[in-house]
Every structure is written in C-alpha cells, then in structure tokens.
Image (spheres, grey):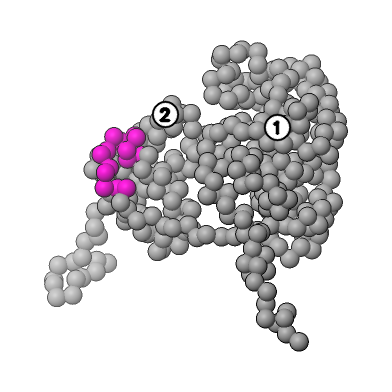
Amino acid sequence: MESVNPGSSQPLRPAPGPSPAHLGADLEQRARILDRIRAAIRARHYSPRTEKAYVGWAARFLSFCEPERAESLGAADVSRFLTRLATRDRVSASTQNQAFSALLFLLQDVLGRDLGDVRDVVRAKRPVRVPLVLSRGEVATVLGAMDGTPRLMAQLMYGAGLRLLECCRLRVKDVDFARHEITVRDGKGRKDRRTVLPGKLVDPLRAHIQRVRRQHELDLAGGGGSVALPDALDSKYVNAAWEWAWQWVFPALRPYEDPATGRRRRHHVHETAVQREFAIAVRVSRLAKPATCHTLRHSFATHLLEGGYDIRTIQELLGHRDVATTMIYTHVLNRGGRGVRSPLDGAD
C-alpha cells in the first residue's frame, strides 16, 4: 500500500536509488583510483604497510564522498571526513593524522590537485605521553618467563633497542658478531641504522643462527630455500633469494608458496606470534603494568640514559630523526615528581 504525504492527495513515491549501471560505474571509478594509488606508492618504494593503510583510507574517503566526484574533491571534503572521524568515530589523534597523510597523498600525488589550502585543515594534536618503562628487575622477570626463539627476540629488542618488526625482519648479513653490531635495514622512515649487539647474546644468537642454517640447507635440498628481497633486488641479483646471507634470522616455522613466482620460501616469523608470547610472560610475571614488546625499546633507551649515555648517542641507536623525539626519555632524570622532596618525607 502506498503511503500518503500529509496535506497532499498524492501518494509518496520512494526516492529513486542508483541504477545497477550507475553503481557499476561508481565501483569501476573507485577501483581505478585505488589502482593509481597502489602504482604511485610502489613507484616511490613505500612499504607494503603504508600501501595497505593509504589504500584503506582512500577507499573509506571515496565511499564517504561518492566516487563520481573524484575530479572535484578538495580541502572541504578532507575537512568533513576528518571531522567525522574525530566526532562520530572518536578515533585517536594518530589515526586521524594517518588518515590526513593518506588523503593528502591521494589528492596531491595521485589526482594531481593543487592543495595549498588543504594543509590548513586542522589536524589532531597527539597527546604527549610519558613512555611506559620497566625497571631492570621487571625486564629480567618478564624475560625469565619466556623461552625459545620468542625469548631471544625479546632479549634483542631490549638489548639493542629494536622495534618488533625490525627484529622480525633481521637478515643474517646484518648481524656482525665480530663488531658486536646489528644493522637495521629499512627501519621506520626507510632509514638504516646501526645498533649494539649485546655481548650476552652473542653465543645464544650464534647457536640459533646455526640451527636456522641447517634448516635452510634442508629447504634448499627440497627445492625451496628462497626469501623475499627488498625493492627490485630479486631481478638485479637473480640468485640472491637463495643465498645464506639474505635469509631471515628468525624464519617462520612453515614454508609457503609464493603465488607470484611459484617458489617455495619462508617468511620471517610473524610479529603476532612474538606479541602473544610476550603478553603471556607479562601476565605470568604479575606485573602491574600493561607492557608490550615496544616497552622493551622504551626501557632500553631509559636505562641507557640512566647509565649516563648522552642523548645524541641514544638518538642514533634508536634511529630517531629528531632529537626532540628522544628527549621524551629524560623523564627519568626527574624522579619522584621532578626531583622534589615531598614535605611528608621531611615531616618529624
């Protein structure tokens, strides 16, 4: 039965929806834009994670604005989208800023828009947080509750200040036992850096790598044994993918078949496996702190600063571009409320 509009004898007619042909054109337009984003990101050699994040935000933005308007999108659309993220979706400042970077890339680098005004869009300010740090005793307790490869990786993250993914992606060639040095390749911001290899880990890590080498030799004998290489090195050095130097220090337990090449290879251990083991260790240790793998990196920096190392040295070891980022760890120099003696402690 047709409804009737109050005050009118004419029945209400449902608003015409988009036709299937129109929907198909929208989807096709969106797919073309997303493909252009992927091509632009790969041409700039951005990381796969950046590609996934940027494509995801672009897809959400195009759905919000309607794809057929792609050629007229501008700063006002970005502002409306970011405002909705903050007010309706209540996302964090870091999430909103990631969305802004993705949309800036879409409109400026992919669609070729002149966006002098979009840079004036108000961006969320990330709150300044004092990093969560474990004491040396707490670190020892957590590490003592772990074993096997996850424990060795956690020890490296604490002892060398590695991020979790940097630890997972270590290759054999980047561990220098003679110099007690680890080279981090393609870290955050696509920067390389060198950091310390703890002396206590030389023997355990050497023994671990020997076990990995035996597994690699078995993989080679079985027709596998290759790994993914960065950028275009796979075509430049045709045999490098099978060479021992390029193998992961922490390979996954199971090989897989690369759908693009058909090669049987191993990925590095997945970060979630290490996170899971670390979370169990924190729970078993009964810590009253919500520590994560990244807490080990914070603890590395803090304990070095407590030990008297200068801030510039710590900046280099952490790979921070700006020393202001490293300065957050100076909170340890102001213990007990910025070094103030409480009047209660001085009471008779």
Position of the C terminus by quadrant: bottom right
Residue 115 shown in magenta = yes
Please state which amino acid type lies under the numbered disc 1: Ile
Quote the CA–CA distance across marks 2 and 1: 33 Å
Q: Is residue 167 above or below residue 86?
A: above
From the image, tell me which residue sits under label 1. Answer: 182
Kindly identify which residue carries mark 2.
39
Choose top left, top right, bottom left or bottom right for residue 164: top right
Q: Is residue 135 left or right of residue 98?
A: right
Q: Please give the range of residues in magenta.
A: 106-119
Q: Position of residue 55 (x, y in %)?
A: 44, 40
Q: Is residue 16 visible?
A: yes
Mark positioned earlier in the residue sequence (2 or 1)? 2
Are the two marked residues, 2 and 1, in contact with CB atoms closer than 8 angstroms? Answer: no
Three-letter amino acid code of the residue under disc 2: Ala
Q: Nearer the viewer, residue 176 or 248?
A: 176
Where is residue 25? Give x, y as percent.
30, 38
Q: Which of the 4 image quarters holds residue 22?
A: top left
Q: How many marks?
A: 2
Residue occupying the point 56% across, 39% down: 188
Residue depicted at x 30% and y 36%: 111
